[in-house]
Image (cartoon, helix red, strand yellow):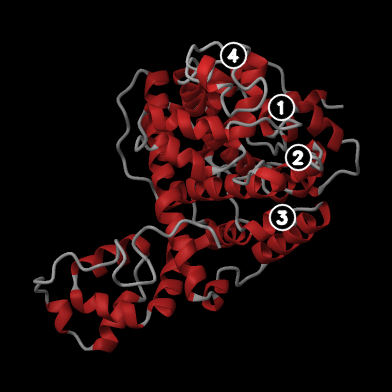
Amino acid sequence: MAMPRDLILGREDSRPGLVCDNAQIDSPLTSLPPELRLQILSELDLDQLSALVHASPAFYRDYSRTRRSTLTKCLQLTFRSVAIDAYAVFQSYSDEFAEARTHNKVTQFLHSYQYQRASAHNSHFTKHLAEDEAISMAAFHSSIIKPLARCYVNWALTNLSEETKGSLDHGLLSKAEETRVLRALYRFQLCCNLFGVGRFNGSRRRKWIQDPFEDIDILKLFFCLFEPWEVEEIACIYAFAEEKLDQIFEDIRWDVHEENPKFEHQGQPPTPVGASHFDVRETRDELLEGTISRGLDLLQMLFSGVWDHEQVVFVLQAQITFLTRSFLEDGAWSEITQNELRQEPPSHREQKQERRAPLPFTGDGDSETDGPRPPLAWTVMWGGIYSNLFGEYVNDVIHQWGYVMWDAARLERTGGKELLVRQWNEGWEDYDPRDHLD
């Protein structure tokens, strides 16, 4: 398994990370009986577990003796309703899975994924994880998902404040908001694992590009598993990745340009033919789609700021890539692809849209116990009536501030609700796209 492991939960105690930082700590907790300390460890999420075992030698020793059982319980508390999404990313992240990404293999995988999502015990898989598997999942969450979640939230809320001319909202995320952001990141990564270029170069990548899924396949097999506002959560993550990566492309444009004098002696840069043509918008968009489809691990390293300019140039020269088809924005999410799907017998969601089923806002509940609930923004945008339209039907400027990520309270205090109505009306005016579908 190649998922990143260079964080707090390495297997060996001597590895950097999970080593007690303060051997002199003195706390009443450390004097508790071992069985009570273990009980405490079993009730912590990943951040809390990391903080405690870094701070206390006693809890660190307890954790080291019970690493697998403690960590699997911790993951269940950390992931909550996102557990199956996180596990699916773990399963589809390996070299072995990438080499076997046939149509049949991916279809079977997604059938299993949907079955687990529908199960009443969908988070109990963690009990059966091996220690190495639990460590890999924890490391990916800590090193990739959590930093990108923070980066995304800051980006989206900054955009919101700029659009509303208000101050930046520093309020902590609610559980519902955190769930929306985390599941969107995991589902975006899962989509990249299943349908993107992936992290793999050489013969494996060429073999995959020669046998891609059609846009309609990606829509039917993957995105139709989710409620439309959940697809829009993923679309908001894509908008974030696209804007941030496009800025990086602009920053390195001359460094990879074939007319740069440095290539007179070095030869052409190690990028695909045409990949240096960032000045051509169509080419640049194709490169953005292909490179974004490599997934979050590359994006996290690019967005984190840990690499200097030369390192970014060096990495992207090897990672910039084309896809032979559109990935999401102009592919599975396009009006054309969604219209194509409507030529088939209508799904239960299409039927709800056709009969204009009511979809009122019922609060920002816990999706673990209350089932899927549309956020206020979704019900406002569609007038409290069910809609199964997403992607290209939603103006890009709305994706820029993550409209479906936020609770009603945040939308009210930031002016996001009024902004949404204004931007929606600017895009569609009095036209309801649901009234004019093929």
155 to the left or right of 49: right
Which disc is residue 126 wearing?
none
Give the residue pinned by disc 1: 330
**Residue drawn where x is 67% and y is 44% of the image:** 202
Q: Are marks 3 and 2 in contact (CB under 8 Å)?
A: no
Give the residue pinned by disc 4: 426
Q: Are marks 2 and 4 in contact (CB under 8 Å)?
A: no
Residue 400, position in %: x, y?
50, 26
Earlier-in-chain disc, 4 versus 3: 3
Give the residue pinned by disc 2: 209
Earlier-in-chain disc, 2 versus 4: 2
- The mark lying in front, picked from 2 and 4, is 2
* Marks 2/1: CA–CA distance: 18 Å
How many residues crowd around disc 3 within 10 Å: few (fewer than 14), some, or many (20 or more)? some
Figure quadrant of the N terminus:
bottom right
* Marks 4/1: CA–CA distance: 21 Å
Earlier-in-chain disc, 1 versus 3: 3
- The mark lying in front, picked from 2 and 1, is 2
Residue 426 to residue 160: above or below: above
What amino acid is labelled 3 in the image?
Glu
How many residues crowd around disc 1 within 10 Å: few (fewer than 14), some, or many (20 or more)? some
Earlier-in-chain disc, 2 versus 1: 2
**Residue drawn where x is 71% and y is 46% of the image:** 203
**Residue drawn where x is 53% and y is 58% of the image:** 2
Give the residue pinned by disc 3: 99
**The residue tagged with tag 3: helix, strand or loop?**
helix
* Marks 1/3: CA–CA distance: 26 Å
Q: How many marks?
A: 4
| Rendering quarter of residue 286 | top right
Q: Are marks 2 and 1 in contact (CB under 8 Å)?
A: no
Q: Are marks 4 and 1 in contact (CB under 8 Å)?
A: no
